Amino acid sequence: MGTKSNELQVKQMNEINGIIAIWYREFKVFQREKSRIVASVVNPILWLLIFGGGLGASISISGINYQTFIFPGILIQAVLFSSVFFGVYIVWDRKIDFLKEVLVAPISRTSIFIGKIVGGATDSIIQSIILLILGAILEKAGLIPGLKLTFVSTVGALIILFITTTSMVSIGLIIGSRMESPEGFQLITSFLLFPIFFLSGALFPLNRLPAWLGTLTLIDPLTYSVDALRHTILGASQYGLALDFGVMIGFTVLVIAFGTYAFEKMKV
Amino acid sequence: MSNHIIETENLTKQYGNLVAVGNLNLKIEEGELFGLLGPNGAGKSTTILTLTTILKPTSGHATVGGFDIVKQPSQVRKSIGIVFQDPSSDDTLTGYENLKLHGMLYGMPVSLREERIREVLKLVDLTDRKGELVKRYSGGMRRRLEIARGLMHHPKVLFLDEPTLGLDPQSRENIWAYIENLSHEEHISLILTTHYMEEVDRLCDRLAIMDRGKIVALGSPAELKRIIGGEVVVMKSASPDIGSLKSLAYVKHIETKDGVVSLTVVNANEHLPEILQKTGMVDSVEIHSPTLNDVFLHYTGREIRDEAPEGGWGQRAMNYRSNK
Ligand SMILES: Nc1ncnc2c1ncn2[C@@H]1O[C@H](COP(=O)(O)OP(=O)(O)OP(=O)(O)O)[C@@H](O)[C@H]1O
Ligand SMILES: [Mg+2]
């Protein structure tokens, strides 16, 4: 009995070490690729200032400045793109034999998958923190008035972004686990990303949509992340936090389960 | 239990209808330096990937270090190290970081890990370069790093899939010296694949010649050469008269291809004049002791070509870099 539970403990320790190992590698790579960090912060700010500024000059949404209104959506967009794109790294790992080096290690594929999620999520959370700080600065500068960034709302925002990045990294990894070439990955993800992004209501309010569009936004899982984030940092929400979190967590559990399966079946 | 570190029984791996490895039966002794020699597509890598649990066999059985590759993959993984055919280190990390990552993946305690990193770096002479990004390593250095990494967790068996593919002669010589050193200093069995004759000839205790998924010959390099049973005489001639050679008792084997005649002759030095009388004018003659190339030719009727396959190791590493 005793040795058996000991063995189990050792096995669990090994799996945890494996997850930390994968995370360590992803984090080192992230640190080295400075241009990736810069791009992942600059692009959203350009969206906010140019797209938001341009359109915001002529519209405001139920009394909220348009730039302020889309700030949560832009945060989600940033996390969506960097998270799903993270899956391309597994395609690169497969192109050389690095993936085999990881697969031949005495850890389960589930741990490899989880390590990768934690790695991708870390990147997105760092990106989110920088964007939230920039948001606070822009708010002080009067560019996005009405943004409510308190300690509590900031933590809340990061939790929402964390759940979102977890599911989106999973989706990227599932696609990556099937793809032989980075070009193939790019093609599939751009097909997927744009509808997910545009239907999420990141750039427009959800309450006055034509019926067909309204239905489409309802089946987009990202809609609920945008809504929850709006609730948290703007105080305006369509569906309420309970529904938002319910859908977000449910969807995340689903894609993680599916991703674990995809990794189990993944070919080298 | 037997002291075979690897034992296979009708091990078979198919890709769809293609039989990459068919009914492989192999026994490798503990502590041996064993070579798998074969041309491109012979099934060497497939054999290694199956034995290391990365691929599942289609049928048959195998044990590595006493563990079944299908039923006990995780024990197998703990007892083996592998250096893959393609580059498998992360070039955005430093040499040291690649080793640290490996130690973490294998659950090594920190102090043991650090000590072992120092040891293996020293073994492959990379201590001075450990802090540099692998991007800046030469092909030979990268290969050495990957050998060091394969050794880190004290495996019982180390697999080396084409360890010198695509390297220049000097780096190759270098790697050979490390492998020799290793088989003396670390208590380890080594399985290496290659399509370079000189490599197995110089390094291996025993080898299997593989062709089209099958083992066609097995033994020590000396044993295999002895099978040829004489010296090899190679003649170039536009219209050789072979018929008359067949009656000579000391001519063991005749092979013609594209105007080149290869004979296996007992005591060739003595008999050469007589042979030349029979064949008439030839453009050139050469006698040599049998090489593994002759052994390969003997068993397969083809030459093993000593060129790197398309997109060899170095080339693939370069492509990876420029694409990334
Ligand atoms: N993933 C795969 N899918 C389909 N066929 C494959 C795959 N990998 C290898 N093969 C085929 O299996 C056969 C054996 O390949 P393998 O890579 O084991 O040969 P090898 O002896 O290692 O050759 P090389 O010297 O080129 O590395 C070849 O015919 C090859 O085309
Ligand atoms: Mg091969």
Image (cartoon, rainbow, N blue to C red):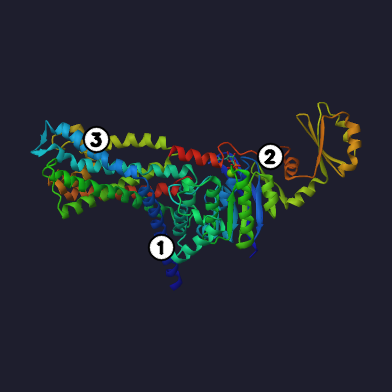
Between marks 2 and 3, how big is the CA–CA gap? 58 Å
* SS at mark 2 in the image: loop
- Whole-percent x, y for residue B273 in the image: 91, 37
- Amino acid tagged 1: Gln
Percent x, y of residue A204: 17, 36
Labels 2 and 1 touching (C-beta < 8 A): no
Q: Which image quadrant: the N terminus of chain A?
A: bottom left
* Label 1 packing within 10 angstroms: few (<14), some (14-19), many (20+): few
Query: Three-letter amino acid code at disc 3?
Result: Phe
Q: Are marks 3 and 1 in contact (CB under 8 Å)?
A: no
Which residue occupies the foreground of this view, A28 or A190? A28
The chain identifier of the residue carrying mark 1 reads: A
- Pointer 2 residue: B304
Q: CA distance from mark 3 to mark 1?
A: 42 Å
In the rendered image, the residue lying farthest to the front is B128
Quadrant of the displayed image that contains ligand 1? top right
- For mark 1, give the secondary structure: helix
CB at mark 2 closer than 8 A to ligand 1? no
Please give left or right for residue A169 compared with residue B113 in the image. Answer: left
Residue on which the image places disc 3: A198
Q: Are marks 3 and 1 on the same chain?
A: yes
Q: Which residue type does callout 2 highlight?
A: Ile
At mark 3, the secondary structure is helix
Query: Which label number is shown at residue B96?
Result: none
The residue wearing badge 1 is A12
